[in-house]
Image (cartoon, helix red, strand yellow):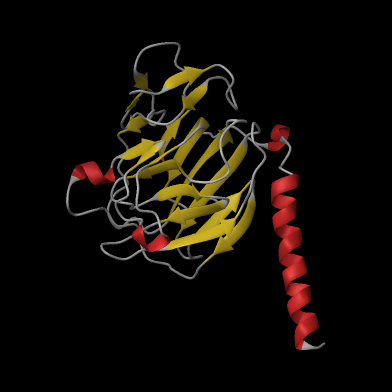
Amino acid sequence: MSRRTAVFFVFTFASLILHSCSENPVDEGKLKVFTLDENTLALYHFNEDSGSILLDETGRGNGTLDSCVRSTTGFAGKCLSLSTGKFSTFGTIIPDNTPNGTIELYFSFDPDSVNTGNHILIGNDGARCNILYKGDTLYFLKNHSNITKYVKALASVQKGKWHHVAGTWGSKGMRLFLNGVCINSNQDTSSYQMSPRSTAENVFFIGKKSRVGLNEIGINQSMHFNGKIDEIRISDIERY
């Protein structure tokens, strides 16, 4: 096989994978509601009837609705509906030096949301653990002090449909999953590290992120999300 033929084959194969990602989302009926087990650090279903409290099924630390609003058209029951300037907070803080973990959720872009720009799904201000979109590229970050660690993949998704995203870290490296498929990984097996500067930098936000810790991936402004978020789970194992 010539070099030109090999390059063409690799490019065509990669294009097919990305095309499948954007045009054939997983059947929503096959996606599952998260359940509680001994490895769950936080679990939110967002099915409260009223009030500003977001219940964590683990009982470790509830969240607050803040400026976000509830919607009855979630992946499973109710969900959070977000737009520019709207966000929610939850008090879960991943313990320092957690060797393995998974952060995952379901999301749906609003049909009228733009394809360009930056969209934060979930993260903390110290960029210790974030899942975000930069244009059509999906990122999972797990940074350390002054070190940017991430995996990324081109992952355009169908708007108005629910999609599962997960970032994992541990002995298998950092891995990024979309609708149950690993779309990229690296060999970094380092533990999760908390920000040493302040507790506030380790608290998680839904639909909100400052530019702190994002310079290495070319983002120098705050981020928001236009769409819906449901079923957030954080675990201390690599679930996938």
Residue drawn 42% across the image and 36% down it: 207
Q: Where in the figure is residue 31, as x and y percent of width and height?
A: 66, 36
Q: Mark yes or no: residue 37 visible.
A: no
Q: Where in the figure is residue 6, as x and y percent of width and height?
A: 77, 81
Residue positioned most to the top: 50
Residue positioned most to the bottom: 2
Residue drawn 62% across the image and 39% down it: 163
Quadrant where the image shows the N terminus: bottom right
Q: Where in the figure is residue 27, as x and y percent of width and height?
A: 74, 37
Say how many tags the image has.
0
Q: Nearer the viewer, residue 99 or 23?
A: 23
Along the horizontal axis of the image, is 13 left or right of 166?
right
Along the horizontal axis of the image, is 31 left or right of 4?
left
Residue drawn 42% across the image and 60% down it: 217
Task: Report which quarter residue 7 is drawn in.
Answer: bottom right
Q: Nearer the viewer, residue 153 or 57?
A: 153
Residue drawn 32% across the image and 49% down it: 211
Q: Where in the figure is residue 148, as x and y percent of width and height?
A: 36, 63
Along the horizontal axis of the image, is 139 left or right of 125?
right
Task: Report which quarter residue 120 is drawn in.
Answer: top left
Q: Judge whether 231 appears above or below 147 on screen.
A: above
Q: Judge whether 114 appears above or below 187 on screen.
A: above
Q: Mark yes or no: residue 155 visible.
A: yes
